Amino acid sequence: MSAHGDVDMGHTVAGWTGTYIAVVGFSVAGFGMILASGLVMAAGCAVIALAAVLTWALHLAGWGKPSGPRPADQWDWRVKDPTARRGHPNCVGCRMAGRRAVSAAGRPLPEAVGAQL
């Protein structure tokens, strides 16, 4: 049992990687503010943007997770999401990549149909 009880907190490789890189970016940007250097602040902002793009790419590669709870056997943060290639229902990141959540038969899932309006 985790410190949060018997729940899935959504810790994933995509989430942790993006968080660490974003913290570095915010630190660089903050250091740029202390130095009053626009170039260092811009570099920090670029690292933050890199964190967002990398997190999205890792999510699409299966290292993220869909919204809501996952089965208990997928709670570990190192478990790859087997449904990522089809897209997640109501997932903005998957929709931005052109993925729609579909059933095994290839039909759009009901909760994904309304999300694309």
Image: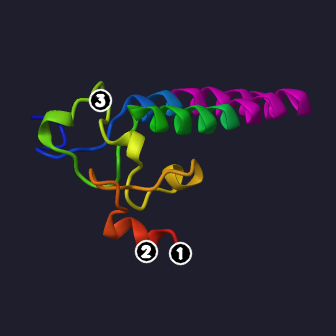
SS class of the residue under badge 2?
helix
Residue 60 belongs to magenta span: no
Which of these two is toward me, 85 or 44? 85
| SS state under label 3 | loop
44 lies above or below 102? above
Q: CA distance from mark 2 to mark 3?
A: 30 Å
The residue labelled by disc 3 is 77
Q: Are marks 2 and 1 in contact (CB under 8 Å)?
A: yes
Q: Secondary structure at mark 1?
A: loop
Task: Kindly identify the amino acid type of the residue bearing the numbered disc 2.
Answer: Gly
Residue 31 lies left or right of residue 110; in this view the side is right
Q: Nearer the viewer, residue 85 or 106?
A: 106
Give residue 37's quadrant in the image: top right
Magenta-highlighted residues: 20-47
**Occupied quadrant, residue 35:** top right
> Residue 85: image x %, image y %?
41, 40
Q: Which quarter of the image is occupied by the N terminus?
A: top left
**Residue in the picture at 75% in, 36% down:** 45
